[in-house]
Image: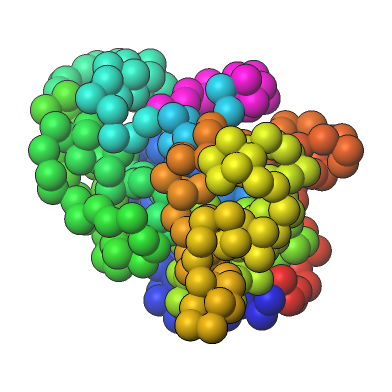
Amino acid sequence: MNINWYPGHMAKTRRKLAEDISGVDAVIELFDARAPRSSRNLDLGELCRDKPRLPVLGREDLADPAVTALWKESLPGSMAVNAASPNVPKIVVPALKKLLSERIQKDAEKGQAGRALRVMVVGVPNIGKSTLINNLLRRKAAKAEDRPGVTRERQWFPMDAGFLLMDTPGMLWPKFEDEETGLHLAFTGAIRDEIMDTETLAARLAETLNTLYPDALEKRYGVTGGLEALAKKRGFLLPGGVLDTERMALTLLDEFRAGKLGRITLEKPSCSTSSQGSGDSLSTPARELRVERDI
């Protein structure tokens, strides 16, 4: 599956983030709890390395809670949230204040108590940055849609708790280190479906689910197997009785992303290649093999 997945505006986004990062006090780094390793952009980590960072596992309501608990242990200081939950401010704001406690104290000593602290929210496309910001603000301010590439320019939003939040465009990196990373990003919707062969992608998703969660397809569709078996069971037919595997592919991808197949996590924070996930832990430098791959 050949994906042209690095549109030109992302190079511009990286340049702007590099310019803006010096003016912020902290960074919220948002991951997808279903694929924390794949959804971590190490380029962002490099840009933000000198700033206090709050790792947030978003979409935890769609992820396997047992595996999310393992990821929280693997990521010191991290938290797991459903970005759309009304409880988000109660979780994130105290964590930000704790993270920036020294900065707040220094401001007070300089006679700048109450200075608004600037916090940049970063992550890959369609990971829920705008939704998280809107919930922290308790109002719809940042444009949020369930597709990548909606936010194209940085935006500042004042927050009652004494913060200024910056919404940033989702940023990918130019090259994969392995096929699995690209697949997981595509499964979760970080890459636009329009530039991919959705039937091939959905077939790979079915294979992955049959390996990691063997009961997921059976519970949802009443059958396991590939797209043809699923389309037949759903009665997705074209004229002449031909199975409509394209419709089934779109259905499978949509229902996985909506959590209708259950709470599923694609990666564990483990070096084991025989279980969910692959490769090294999130804290280990990945994507260092900067080679092009077809996925």
* Quarter of the view holding residue 138: top left
Residue 292 placement, left or right of 194: right
Pick the front one: 100 or 90: 90
Q: Can you give x and y, in whole percent of width and height, for residue 42 in the image?
A: 61, 52
**Which residue sits at x=28%, y=28%?**
85
Where is the C terminus found, in terms of image quarters? bottom right
**Which residue sits at x=47%, y=30%?**
60
Tally of marks = 0
Q: Which residues are magenta?
A: 66-81
From where the camera sits, is residue 107 visible? no
* Quarter of the view holding residue 64: top right
Residue 78 placement, left or right of 127: right
Q: Can you give x and y, in whole percent of width and height, for residue 110 in the image?
A: 22, 22
* Quarter of the view holding residue 69: top right
From where the camera sits, is residue 80 visible? yes
Pick the front one: 211 or 285: 211
Residue occupying the far front of the picture = 240
Instruction: Establish if 105 lies above or below 227.
Output: above
Where is the N terminus found, in terms of image quarters? bottom right
Instruction: Establish if 287 lies above or below 98.
Output: below
Q: Can you give x and y, in whole percent of width and height, for residue 190 in the image?
A: 49, 59
Within the magenta stretch, is there residue 80? Answer: yes
**Which residue sits at x=77%, y=61%?**
178
Instruction: Establish if 41 lies above or below 132.
Output: below
Pick the front one: 186 or 44: 186
**Which residue sits at x=52%, y=56%?**
234
Within the magenta stretch, is there residue 278? Answer: no
Residue 271 placement, left or right of 139: right
